């Protein structure tokens, strides 16, 4: 029984909506809680084309561009394991998540992006040890903050 004001799912996170007089509301509420649990402060294990052999509930992966197995046709989506099942999420502009494999935050801006590590200063005719030290400290700070991938 659709509500005249709302669709049956939310626009951004595809959460199910309840309607007055709806039977078995617990199924919708449980799905909503599972989806929120999967996406709130998300950290993925890695980016890969197929599910891990023994995924644990609460783990999530970014599905690579050439998926296989249970993830066929889901390239670029996020797969989260909840209650022994896969939940899939389409990324939205501005979504930011932590990649445990690289130790780096990535952001979705139409495609997944992550800053690349700048080269360590070297060469030149005048060596400025203080400038090199400052640049190295800046790179170390950006790495510790998860902005740049671990070396």
Image (cartoon, rainbow, N blue to C red):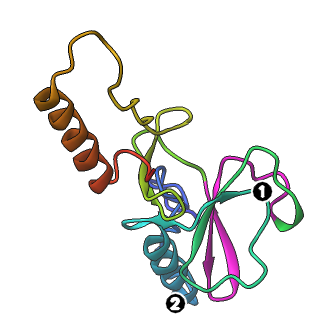
- Judged left or right of residue 63, residue 95 is left
- The dot on residue 26 is 2
- Judged left or right of residue 91, residue 133 is left
- Judged left or right of residue 125, residue 94 is right
- Judged left or right of residue 66, residue 130 is left
Circle 1 sits on which residue? 49
Q: How far apart are marks 2 and 1 (CA)?
A: 33 Å
The boundaries of the magenta stretch are 71-89
Residue nearest the viewer, comparing 38 with 45: 45
Helix, strand or loop for disc 2: helix
Q: Which of marks 2 and 1 is in front?
A: 1
Residue appearing at x 69%, y 87% in the figure:
84
Residue 88 lies, in percent from the top left, at 65, 63
Residue 84 in magenta? yes
Tell me the crowding category of disc 2: few under 14, some 14 to 19, or many 20 or more residues within 10 angstroms, Cα based.
Answer: few
* Outermost residue toward the right in this view: 69
């Amino acid at each position: 029984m659709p509500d005249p004001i709302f669709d049956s799912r939310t626009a951004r996170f595809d959460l199910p909506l309840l309607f007055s007089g709806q039977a078995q509301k617990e199924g919708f509420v449980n799905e909503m809680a599972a989806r929120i649990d999967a996406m709130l402060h998300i950290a993925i294990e890695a980016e890969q084309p197929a599910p891990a052999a023994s995924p644990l509930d609460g783990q999530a992966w970014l599905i690579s561009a050439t998926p296989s197995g249970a993830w066929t046709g889901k390239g670029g989506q996020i797969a989260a394991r909840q209650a022994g099942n896969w939940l899939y999420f389409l990324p939205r502009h501005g979504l930011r998540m932590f990649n445990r494999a690289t130790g780096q935050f990535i952001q979705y801006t139409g495609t997944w992006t992550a800053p690349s590590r700048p080269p360590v200063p070297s060469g030149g005719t005048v060596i400025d040890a203080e400038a090199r030290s400052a640049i190295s400290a800046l790179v170390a700070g950006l790495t510790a903050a998860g902005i740049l991938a671990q070396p």
